[in-house]
Amino acid sequence: QVQLVESGGGLVQPGGSLTLSCAFSGSIFNSYNMAWHRQAPGNQRELVAAITSRGNTNYADSVKGRFTISRDNAKKMVFLQMNSLKPEDTAVYYCFANLISTSRGTWGQGTQVIVSS
């Protein structure tokens, strides 16, 4: 059974940086595409960035040029480097694992990011 544990959230000033981490366990990491989603209060959960098992990436328009998703297959980890943070980036950030060629997915518990002065 896949388990995902996020870490790295916190309070940061506008213009600052944070790196989120997601630890994967319980299955073969290379069989999963990974993603980060976020949900702000009153909003729907939205895709922030995704990375395939081969390392291909895509980003929401709102974070392009500021956020970078990466993965370390040996350590079974996914990262989200967030730079030039804005107050509108405030949300709970969730790691998501999708078994390749299926609709099966697993969510992490989320980590809070607050961008405020």
Image (cartoon, rainbow, N blue to C red):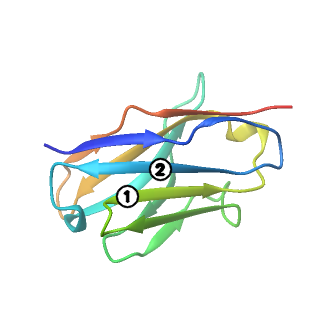
* Residue 100 locus on image (x, y percent): 21, 63
Residue that label 1 marks:
77
Mark 1, Cα crowd under 10 Å, few <14 / some 14-19 / many 20+, is some
What is the x, y in percent for residue 111? 50, 34
Q: Determine whether, in the image, residue 99 is placed left or right of residue 70.
A: left
**Mark 2–mark 1 contact, CB under 8 Å?**
yes
Q: Helix, strand or loop at disc 1?
A: strand
Which numbered dot is residue 34?
none
Q: Measured from the top left, where is residue 47 in percent x and y?
A: 49, 49
In which image quadrant can residue 112 be found?
top right
> What is the spatial separation of the Cα atoms under label 2 and label 1, in whole angstroms?
7 Å
Q: Amino acid at mark 1?
A: Met
Horizontal placement of 63 versus 107: left or right?
right
Q: Which residue is mark 2?
A: 21
Residue type of the residue flagged with mark 2: Ser
- At a point 47% along the width and 70% down the height, the residue shown is 57
| Residue placed furthest toward the top | 42
